[in-house]
Image (cartoon, rainbow, N blue to C red):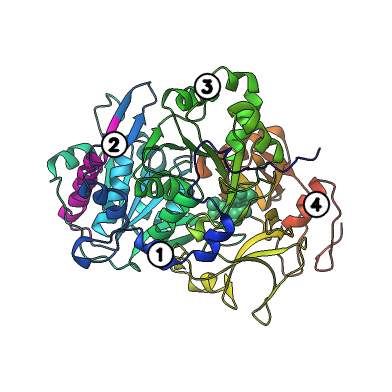
Amino acid sequence: MTFETIRKEPGTFPAPPNLDDYEAARASFSWDDARRRLDGLPGGKGLNIAHEAVSRHVARGQGDVVALRYLDKRGGQRDISYAELDGLSSRFANVLADLGVEPGERVFSLIGRVPELYAAVLGTLKHRSVFCPLFSAFGPEPVQQRMSIGDATVLVTTPALYRRKVLPIRDSLPSLRHVFVVREGEEAAIPDGTLDLRAAMNAASESYEIGPTSPEDRALLHFTSGTTGKPKGAVHVHEAVVAHDVTGYYALDLRPGDIYWCTADPGWVTGTSYGIISPLAQGVTMIVDEAEFDASRWYQALQQHDVTVWYTAPTAIRMLMKAGTEMARQYSYPSLRFVASVGEPLNPEGVAWGQEALGLPIHDNWWQTETGGIMIANFASMDIRPGSMGRPMPGIEAAIVEHDKERGEVRVIDEPGQEGQLALRTGWPSMFRGYLHDEERYAQCFADGWYLTGDLSRVDEDGYFWFVGRADDVIKSAGHLIGPFEVESALMEHAAVAEAGVIGKPEPTAGSIVKAFLTLKPGYEPSEDLRLDILGHARRRLGPAVAPREIDFVDDLPKTRSGKVLRRLLKARELSLPEGDTSTLEESS
Ligand code: AMP
């Protein structure tokens, strides 16, 4: 089935878009102009994300505007104004300062969408320490790895998550000095070795003067995964707010007065860039829903809170599609103006479904942890070609390239329709500034003034980019990037497992699920009990979002002569695809 271009005739938009003429905006754009959209710290003391996100709105007399509308799991609602959020984040900054935490040290979170998370992120940025969110569905092993690589000093979590995921590994984290817990509901006791965050914040002052902040000071640490080795901690600096702000303005069409809802989990980069910083920089009201996905709850929230701009993800859209268009139509969304999606390929069916169910097409956009902000987008005023990620942001040069690794050279592929690696010209403000403690892997991402994204893509004759796949073996499952090496390592800790090869197996809703192929040590025989035991082991170690959903026992794994498991071949065999070039295979089976 082919999907027609969705035309955006001028005059047919629900409201004039911020970017009304793509070509003109690209031609006149400069990052210096984007910088001038922000205020900077009073007295010329630099650029601080938290000041741009909250304090400046208060200074401009907009402190009464609702910043967060928090919908708790149990059906309650609490509105938090910009002034209140400014005070709460100052309290958190004071808590850090009172404990002697130094700017530059790392504050981690392992917590869902609760008001304290927002106070902690912004308070950390005010204090000029570095914030690092973790995904609550991680098991103890991914948590340990990331906190250890990131030299975590402070952790904000809940009593339950602490007991299940941190306590078992706390002894292995010598730099972790302070663990704060946010009690849930009426929960009384807090675990030994932790501090009550609400009590500490209540005792702290709600005024805090942000110290001088260089735009190049480290602000955020976001973990991501590669094909091999440990997770990579992408470092972002305060200057990233320039991109957070202007991409929110152009690519999400945000403006004051908007009721904006980003459904991303706070543990991933979207949850920070577009679940906190970008919308607050625009002065909008954000919906913060503590609960997980629930189709009718979501439709009800869109309707009841008059959401105007909605940013969600393909897996969620596919789950809504599964729940049926009829359910969507039981509600109405007269205020909804713009719907966008990110994180994985959005099928053309998803774009069209938006029109059918919500009355608006869904605008796909593309970016990654390393880019810090949206790089390619379907803008509100631009025709949509369903299945395409859109066109590059003003200020961003994107190209399809061929990378000659030996020579470190990059050749731009000019012919439309040719596949190659997606690359971006370096130098945008939210570009990551390093992988923490891993300069070599950082250097490998760049050649000839280009950042190499690791994605395969093509561009059509009108400059629309189309996602083709990953150039490496990382797995996107329900929008979450999973490194196969991390999963293989955890599987090999099981007494019965000799070797492991892990792939992403296509699945209609989550995009991919994690599938493992295992060989067993002598003395172990494949059985259903053993499979369940290994699955249980992996879930305990890695958490349900990362652990394999399927395991196959095999006699041997295809490997290169140097002994690396050929995941591509495992995948080709699993999917009955051509096996491609097998000349580096150790054995032919
Ligand atoms: P992460 O760093 O976890 O945000 O993952 C980034 C990766 O997700 C990209 O490199 C792509 O492989 C994938 N991705 C993000 N957005 C899109 C999109 N709109 N279409 C296809 N893939 C996407």
Alpha carbon distance from label 3 to label 4: 45 Å
- State which tag comes first along the sequence, 1 or 2: 1
- Residue 491 place in picture, x, y as percent: 60, 48
Question: Residue 182's mark?
Answer: 2
Q: Amino acid at mark 1?
A: Asp
Q: Amino acid at mark 4?
A: Ala
Alpha carbon distance from label 4 to label 1: 48 Å
The residue singled out by tag 1 in the image is 33
The residue singled out by tag 3 in the image is 332
**For residue 470, which quarter of the picture?**
bottom right
Local packing at callout 2 (Cα closer than 10 Å; few below 14, some 14-19, many 20+) is many
Question: Is 548 positioned to the left or the right of 258 in the image?
Answer: right
- State which tag comes first along the sequence, 4 or 1: 1
In depth, the one of 39 and 24 nearer the eye is 24
Q: Amino acid at mark 2?
A: Val
- State which tag comes first along the sequence, 1 or 3: 1
Q: Are marks 4 and 1 in contact (CB under 8 Å)?
A: no
Magenta region, residue range: 79-101
The residue singled out by tag 4 in the image is 572
Could you tell me which residue is drawn at 32 percent across and 43 percent down?
A: 118
